[in-house]
Image (tube, rainbow, N blue to C red):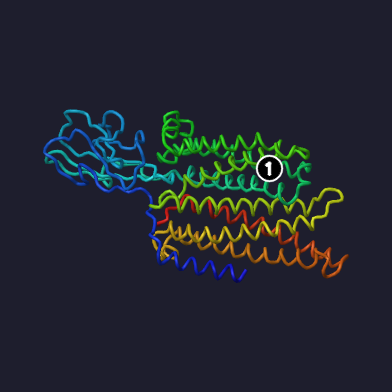
Amino acid sequence: MKRALALLALLAGWLLVSATPASAHVEIVSSAPGDGARLSAAPSLVSVTLSENVGIQPGSIKVVDLGGRQVDSGPVFQPGDVAEQVAVRLRPGLPDGSYLVEYAFVSADSHPVRGTFAFVVGTGPLVTSAGAVSAATGTDAAVSTLSTAVRWLAYLGVVLLGGLAFVLLCRPAARTDPRARRLLHWGAGLVAVTTVATFVLQGPYAAGRNLEAVFDTGLLADTWRVAYGKLLLLRLAGVGALAVLLPGLLRPRLPDRLRARYENLAIVSGFVVLLTFSATGHPVTDPIMFVSITADLVHFGAIALWAGGLTQLALTLYRPLPGEDPVPVAARFSRLAAGSVGAIALSGAVLAVRIMPSLSTLWSTEFGLLVLLKLAGFAALLAVASRSRRAVHEGLTGTRGAGATKTASLHRLRVAVTVEVLLSAVVLALAALLTVTPPGG
């Protein structure tokens, strides 16, 4: 463990020196007309150049006059060859006066970015977002809270599905244990339900609307048109494939060739599910996207294997099958957990360096505070896991006696694993909060 921590510290230091910090969410680089511009005649269109290509998002630009009446005409489009530039046409013959441009874009990592700028035609006063015309630039608190809760439940679902590796590699007897099978099916169901919930919540979340707008067909269509909506549907297809494969994977007697085919398909389906999480989060803001997305895939996948295995191990320790010895199961999982912990630490270091704009982000922003809390939770998990490992290698293996000693060690292991499961749930909650918090603030 000490060697692993020393290697991690060395790698983190090297990355801090050599890595190029990732950008934050999408930003307005320029606009035409510019903010505060005074024009002699009304323009034919209003264009905005963004810091990243977010595609053509319907309804992302709206222009209103002093009375709050919408004066743009037609859909949002790309006026030229610059992929980051989008525009909307204005109605012909607009009279002199102040006009407010309200924009609402969804960045590549699924976060809404809203704001306003103003221009005036003629000699009248300039009305800004602080004036008579008000732009809805905030996210509804109830929608935001519910979206974060849904993300947390989605992570829990993936973790429960990650217990499949424990069943296949550490406890083959679990294939006939209805409780172990139930956990896997609950995981698939949670991922499916939260994917649908995320899809219907994304429209109100991005548009700043309240919960009453979750079934607004226009917002649902907007979500379907953007990459985020399509990735959610891909996630639904991936978890659906896993749900179909589960009965075959859990059959006690299956020809080796057919079992290998089922396992390969499950690996591909699981990879697709994990990819849809990584491709809709902060890693996509990295200029070298491949590095961050790969690190996030490893990070989340290792967490799912470890925490999912812990959940299944807790079930094994508290409710073993008749005549089942949990000792070899715990010993096999100990080796799997050690590899997962190493992968989590290394990939987490890469992610932190690539996503955070600077080292000072750790102590100067909400995102940095959440990262520190997550690190503290991970450190606590390692400490408890060390206790579990000692229980496995000392008392349970029979090297220090049997009877009362083994019973006491088994009790220690049960308590330690229970604490690990609870801490994992807290760490997942912090991860859910991180996904909705901008790295830059």
Question: In the image, what residue occupies the spot 29% across and 38% down?
Answer: 86
Question: In the image, what residue occupies the spot 23% across and 32% down?
Answer: 90
Which image quarter holds the N terminus?
A: bottom right
Q: Is residue 69 left or right of residue 400?
A: left
Question: In the image, what residue occupies the spot 41% across and 41% down?
Answer: 208
Q: Is residue 396 left or right of residue 187?
A: right
Q: Is residue 335 above or below residue 212?
A: below
Q: Quadrant location of residue 261?
A: top right
Q: In terms of depth relative to the viewer, which is nearer, 423 or 127?
A: 423
Q: Which residue is mark 1?
A: 184
In this rendering, the count of numbered labels is 1
Secondary element at image label 1? helix
**x, y (%) of residue 394?**
78, 68
**x, y (%) of residue 344?**
57, 58
Q: Is residue 221 above or below residue 122?
A: above
**x, y (%) of residue 358?**
39, 62
Q: In terms of depth relative to the viewer, which is nearer, 174 or 332?
A: 332
Identify the amino acid type marked 1.
Answer: Leu
